[in-house]
Amino acid sequence: MARTIERRAALSALWRGGGHVIIATLLMAAPIQAQSADTRVPPPPGFVSFCVRFPDQCETPSGEPSDVSLTDERWQALRQVNTQVNESIWPEDDETHYGRPEYWTIPTDGYGDCDDYALTKRKELIDRGFPELALRMAVVNMPTSGRHAVLVVATNKGDFVLDNLTDDVVNPQRTPYTWIEEQSADNPREWVSLQPDPHDRERVAAGSIK
């Protein structure tokens, strides 16, 4: 319990917003933005390296849907995985942890940064039978702290965000973020821009992901 309290204290200054999802929110949730082939962008370098080391997490499934039917059981699974992973990993940046500015991985030592939380949640949900194409890593811009990685789950009731900065599972419109890019709905190795102007991605691409 003390570890959980300390973790939340360490993260609380980074998160402003959120709140609990209620039934009305589920009914109103919408995708972040429609994807199209002309918005393809290079994947983040950390993700490219991750796929070299974890090729099974970056395969293109055959015949799997690009979203998941959000039953009560699956909704509870999203909330459970988000909370459990948030509590099981202690926040530590890559420079301190690995001696390099950016290193995406599924940690085994209990330490990681935002992309490590998100990749761990993605693996946990894949193991629970969620379709891989519905589980999309995404990069956002936080209002005051730069870039940040989260997991987006595409469902038949809209998209939902699993974030290490909050145990609440919310739709993207309820976050304070500017959405930059995410994994493609067609191929987990490809990424698409979520910026109205593709050149905006270049203006926010500098710096490591927090």
Image (cartoon, grey):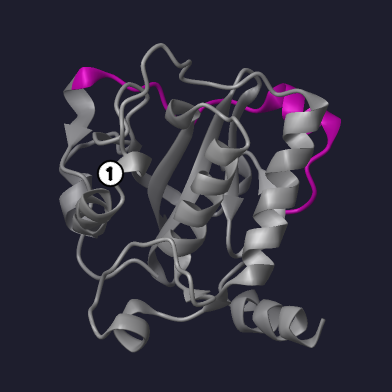
Q: Disc 1 designates what residue?
A: 55
Q: Position of residue 192 (x, y in %)?
A: 27, 33
Q: Is residue 199 left or right of residue 175?
A: left
Say if 81 sits above or below 145 in the image: above
Residue 168, percent across and down? 72, 53
The part of the image, by quadrant, that contains residue 203 is bottom left
Tell me if residue 32 is in the magenta stretch: yes
Q: Is residue 82 left or right of residue 192?
A: right
Q: Nearer the viewer, residue 62 or 118?
A: 62
Q: Nearer the viewer, residue 63 or 209?
A: 63
Q: Secondary structure at mark 1?
A: helix
Query: 57 left or right of 47?
Result: right
- What residue is at 79 percent from the left and 87 percent from the top? 2
Q: Amino acid at mark 1?
A: Pro
45 shown above or below 135: below
Region of the chain picked out in magenta, as a range: 18-37
Residue at 36 percent across and 16 percent down: it is: 62
| Along the line of sight, the residue nearer the viewer: 17 or 126 | 126
Residue 43 at what x, y percent from top left?
Answer: 21, 45
Query: Which residue lies at the image location 57% right of the left edge and 30% below the top edge?
Result: 130
Q: Is residue 12 visible?
A: yes
Specify the principal SS of the magenta part.
loop
In the picture, the quarter occupied by the N terminus is: bottom right
Residue 38 lies in the magenta stretch: no
At a point 61% along the width and 83% down the height, the residue shown is 10
Please identify the quarter of the rendering in which residue 101 is found.
bottom left
Quarter of the image where the C terminus is located? bottom left
Report whether 192 appears left or right of 24. Answer: left
